[in-house]
Image: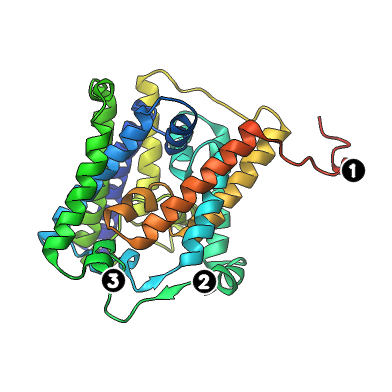
Amino acid sequence: MSDSHLQLFITLLGFAGGAVFGYAARSAHFCTLGAMEEAYYGAERTRLRTWLLAIAVAVAITQYLDIAGYIDLQRSWRLGTHISLGGAVIGGLMFGLGMALVGTCAFGMLVRLGGGDMRALLSSLVLGIVGYMTMSGILAPLRLATVERLSLELPPLSTQMLPVLLLGESPLARTLFAALLVLGLGGWALSSARFRRKNLHILAALALGLAIGWGWWITSTLGQETLYPQQPDSYSFVRPIGQSILWLMISTGASAKFLVGGVFGVIAGAFLAAWRQREIIWEAFDDAREMRRHLLGAALMGTGGIMAGGCTIGQGMTGIASLSLSAFLALGGIIAGALLGIRLLIEGEWPRPPRFMRRHTP
């Protein structure tokens, strides 16, 4: 198989896993922001239990594949010696706040787009473009001069895998750490008899967790056989959205990759689920105020997601599955930013623009 055909095959495998992601999320109405909001304001915990069960499955599969030698997590940038403390915390806060403004995360926007939400289309474009600007464009020097200075560099040949940092290099200690995390998250999720009766949500959690393991396995095996091997990784939806936009514009000069296939796969899977449930509805912004809020939130998610190294899926599932310290820090920042944004939107009032800017505002 030629290199170009192998790249296409890997992209299609990424599409397949993304389709599973999108179909499962849309079918179970899974949303990470919704999980946080429901858990914070009410007694409902279904979406939170779904998310935590999915994380538990992702950790179990990913750590098994690594310990058994099927993949090598140490080759992933997620476990490198560079820990961007400022990026994880500040970027996580920005991403979480942006989530609250938009009403969902980067992954959730793709799921909504699959159901015909044109607000999600525009927000995804803004997120992808601003994310690329922050990663390697006009905003990159500002990022490097500010948050990247708040970083920690570990000794060479070391790793930021959390159990290794806390307990040392012992394989047994790492296995016990992963097992306790899986049992803790999965056990709490399944501790509710009401949740155990929700077969659709349990199946969705299993599918999401399996898709994360699928991504790690494909990029660690077939992804190493191409002319330009890629680092092992799994699904994430900030930088890949920007890469997908770029690929659509210059596809004759660049090949698609696993995560680009995942972006389009999520949209396709969500569309299939929405069509099956008769939920395809063309939606647009209600007014200019809603549009401004979505655009600002998407820009914050694009910038914050690059700084934090991922989103609620990229860090909240893929990163946590690798047991990366940065992932735990970023997820904490995302949750804090999202809860802050929810409180401001529901209980507070955003500052109004100056009078001269409101003259022609409806």
Q: Is residue 160 visible?
A: yes
For the residues marked 1 and 2, what is the alpha-carbon distance in whole angstroms? 39 Å
Label whose residue precedes the other's in the sequence (1 or 2): 2
Q: Amino acid at mark 1?
A: Phe
Coordinates of residue 100 in the picture (x, y in percent) = 56, 39
Coordinates of residue 289 in the picture (x, y in percent) = 71, 34
Q: Secondary structure at mark 2?
A: loop
Q: Amino acid at mark 3?
A: Thr
Q: Do labels 1 and 3 touch, CB within 8 Å?
A: no
Q: Is residue 358 above or below residue 280?
A: below
Residue at the limit of the structure toward the bottom, as seen here: 156
Q: In the picture provided, is 337 more to the left or to the right than 192?
A: right
Label whose residue precedes the other's in the sequence (1 or 3): 3
Which residue is disc 1 drawn over? 356
Q: Amino acid at mark 2?
A: Leu
Q: At x 32% / y 81%, what residue is drawn?
A: 155
Which residue is disc 3 drawn over? 159
Q: At x 27% / y 65%, what residue is drawn?
A: 166
**Disc number lying in front (1 or 3):** 3
Label whose residue precedes the other's in the sequence (3 or 2): 2
For the residues marked 3 and 2, what is the alpha-carbon distance in whole angstroms? 18 Å
